[in-house]
Amino acid sequence: MRKIIATTLCLICLCACNSNKQAVTEEEPQLVGPVFEADSALFYCAAQCEFGPRIMNSKAHDDCEQWITEKFQQYGAVVTTQKTDITAWDGKVLHSTNIIASINPEAKQRVIICAHWDSRPWADNDLDSTNWQKPVMAANDGASGVAVMLELCRAISAADTLGMPNTGIDFVCFDAEDYGAPDDANIENSEDTWALGAQYFAKNYKAPEGCTLIGAILLDMVGGQASVFYQERLSKEYAQSLVDDVWQCASDAGYSSFFTNQAGGRITDDHKPLNEAGIPAIDIIPYYPDCEQSCFGPTWHTVNDDMNHIDKNTLKAVGQTLIQYLYSK
């Protein structure tokens, strides 16, 4: 991920980053659905990182694909894949795989929950220029979203006494998201060089016959320290009602300190091609208004995006909010 389109957003990023961990809840929660186990999500995040950076066309990438697929299948999901070769901005052919894991396939009302699973090949936002050609481990910018989805799948499949939520869920792991052109590449229409797997998915998606698709919820960098999730502007433009529903569920579950009703920036991310294809999609993504290094936080596209900077409180806040949403529908 990507760029912030709203120019006003980065103009107010003037202060040093605050990496203090947050309290998990502030108000008395009104929980529905199973418990989201943060330790489990933390394990899934670390397991992806153990493969190394999941950069395109690498062994780590291929091995992690198999692991993600098997984990979803272990928890009862029906898994399919979209495989395609994509020519990137630099002429490299990327062997891309979108992983789609469906639960409650009989449900006629469905929601997509998605995240990207690839790693950025270059730590081009690192403060140390000697790191700019090193790959990013992507513990937060990639692995955290997949980890939350895996724990959601596990928690729902294990909650026998609660049954399945009324809404069917399609977990989608987008590939080739973070191969976007660096700023110094001087590529025309550089926004189109990002989110390549999501672009392919959006062009080829067809809702199951007789099903109503509520929309898509994108999880991007949902495990970082001191994360606060502002309401991203592209999400508000295309899917305000879905934003309202998810943020209300965060409040009901006791996580309004993580989910603020303030508007953030307008961001190029995997939800952009979905919205442009008529799939209403929102982006749960942190915004750091007081971070000088990046409005996406101090580890974004740096070699420090590792497990040392993952906070399970953030994973918990996002995961329990989504359970609240799924079981409230």
Image: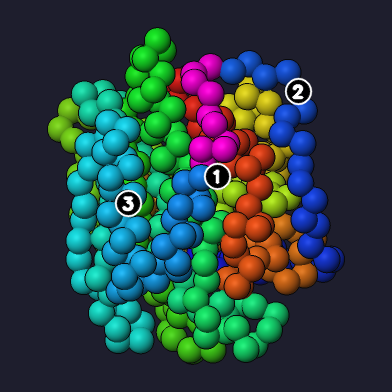
Q: Could you say where residue 168 lies in the image, as x and y percent from the top left?
A: 31, 28
Highlighted range, magenta:
32-42
Q: Which amino acid is tagged 3?
A: Trp
Mark 3 element type? helix
Q: Could you say where residue 110 lies in the image, as x and y percent from the top left?
A: 31, 31
Residue 37 is a magenta residue: yes
Q: Which mark is residue 27?
A: 2
Circle 3 residues within 10 Å: few <14, some 14–19, many ≥20: some
The residue labelled by disc 1 is: 42
Q: CA distance from mark 1 to mark 2?
A: 24 Å
Circle 1 residues within 10 Å: few <14, some 14–19, many ≥20: many
Q: Is residue 319 above or below residue 143?
A: above
Residue furthest out toward the right: 15
Q: CA distance from mark 1 to mark 3?
A: 16 Å
Q: Which amino acid is tagged 2?
A: Glu
* Residue 254 located left or right of residue 136: right
Mark 1 and mark 2 lie on one chain; the one further toward the N terminus is: 2
Task: Residue at 21%, 24% (x, y): give it.
Answer: 106
The residue labelled by disc 3 is: 67
Q: Is residue 6 above or below residue 262?
A: below
Q: Is residue 253 above or below residue 241?
A: above
Q: Could you say where residue 254 lies in the image, as x and y percent from the top left?
A: 68, 26
Task: Residue at 63%, 42% (x, y): give it.
Answer: 312
- Residue 282 visible to an observer of this rendering: no
Quadrant where the C terminus is found in the figure: top left
